[in-house]
Image (spheres, grey):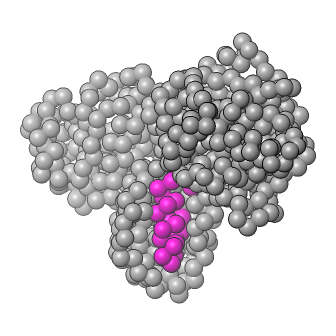
Amino acid sequence: MCGIVGYIGFRSVSDVLLEGLHRLEYRGYDSAGIAVMQEDHIAVRKRAGRVNELSQAVKLHPVESKVGIGHTRWATHGETTDENSHPHLGGNGEVAIVHNGVIENYDSLRNQLMEMGYVFKSQTDTEVVAHLIAHHLAEQTRLDSEEPCVATCLRAIELTLDRLKGTFGICALFQSCPETIIAARSGSPLVIGVGKDEFFLASDASPLIGYTSDVVYLADNEIAVLEPNSMKIAHRTTGSVQPSIQTLDQVSADIELGDFPHYMLKEIFEQPQSIANALRGRFDDGEGTAVIGGLNLTAQQLRTIDRVVLTACGTSWHAGLVGEYLLEEFARLPTEVEYASELRYRNPPITDRTLVFSITQSGETADTLAAMRECKRKGHPTLAICNVVGSTIAREADGGIYLHAGPEIGVASTKAFTSQVTVLTLLALYLGRMRHLSYPAGKRIIKQLKMMPEKIEEALKCHEQVQEIADKYSQFNNFLYLGRLYNFPVALEGALKLKEISYIHAEGYPAAEMKHGPIALVDEQTPSFFIVPRGGIQPKVISNMEEVKARKGPVIAVATEGDREVERIADDVITVPDVEDYLQPLVCSIPLQLFSYHVALLRGCNVDRPRNLAKSVTVE
């Protein structure tokens, strides 16, 4: 949530910052701003609204410099106004900061600062940090009896951080040190791009792509001091750190729209490739099993596991629910799926023979990270299924599996979901072959998995059909999504997608549970979306469809190609290719993603940046 960008070097800083903010806008888009060094002051330009509005303001009142910081906001404290936009100035303008995260004790700090005479212009917790840095800078300057230098500014930052409770990624400019940027993190991600005589700073790697391929991921409690020709990093308690420079493997095309009107549609259509990437190099045909290389546990250790806990939030939780069914069917391992936001505060009985998997696209989700850390604290093996290389969860987990889905910019997750389900299928195959799954069964699963990129291509052919159905139903304000077994999590995910980007009330249920309450909602104005592909339990779901029709409820069905029985009952049918039941979530989620996309467009919603949401939830 929220995006930070910074630059120090030889380029025109406004151009770099604005381009970076455009790339980070999916992280927060309530307001945006930049602060740049001038000869005798720090100049700030900021606006409520989108980054484009900030760009227009900068065109009208340009600022030239080689050093600056920027921010795009997802509001936590204070309304969306120019005054609450970042950057914020501290003292009399001697320091400017941008901040991601939440300062939990900001109210008491604010009262202390007001008693000392500091005047607040915003409602944010961030301005508290700016004034507190200015206060400590003034104190240190008096103690040193000299003009502030980089060491003085650094000490002011350190003293401020010691007083903060909460999570933060902070980037600061100082009027007295015009060729310096100081950054610090605790719980909110920051990455440094390393160039020749220049450095970049951002919340994630997307603003760095095309400028540099060398990056340093700041760890918790690290502080970085950037100057045009030097980078120094230190841990707040252990001292100087030797930076570990890693290489980005992304290219600028990964984050560009190309011929697509929206990132969400682009990412939906990237799923054949993202699933192929998740599968690449992960089959052992000779042994009829998967190749999972990053778990950092021996086969013998894995065989002693008698329980799996999957923890995640949102869409990743839905993928985990599919994973529960897969692991219990293939590996015969009791599996539970926990909301990370609940698990972090509970004290469940987890033994040393329980394997804990955190599932996350970004690798920075605050609740998932906290749940993982709590499990690690108690000595449990903690692994991750993650998309972003170098993210906090990827670094702190004992091992794990990367999705290799590429950047996902649209706030509503699409290709990350199917990649997570694909990786969970591989994991279930891998653990299953260690335990109860036969060699012929493993071979059959591999054969079916290898066909999935092609099957997803086929599923995407429903696009025009979905557009027509979306046009028919776009003005309805309540939907039920219903499926059973592997398709119950798909129903939950389909309902979430519609809620996220269309702002339509939708609920997902196991189809048989409809009779236990939700059927009371059925009427002519409440369509029911049934996920009903061929399978052993299909007749039961068809019976549920009949019950809705008997009460005059409109029925939309996702069904296997050529299924005449479903076509006879449903008002509208979207067809998907025939696959094994455990792979149905992959093909059945495609039309639901497309449906939510087109309904959102028809209702005039911003599909890539839905209201009140941000891509990576890095605050509690």
Q: Is residue 118 left or right of residue 359?
A: right
Find residue 387 and report its image quarter: bottom right
Say whether residue 403 is magenta: no
**Given the current orientation, which residue lies at the most extreme top position?**
60
Q: Which residues are magenta?
A: 362-384
Which of these two is toward me, 425 or 283? 425
User: For the image shown, how many numbered marks are present on the structure?
Assistant: 0
* Residue 457 x %, y %: 50, 44
Name the residue at 60% across, 76% down.
296
Find residue 217 and report its image quarter: bottom right
Which of these two is toward me, 484 or 28? 28
Say whether residue 379 is magenta: yes
* Residue 17 x %, y %: 73, 31
* Residue 389 x %, y %: 65, 56
Which of these two is toward me, 10 or 442? 10
Residue 139 in view, yes or no: yes
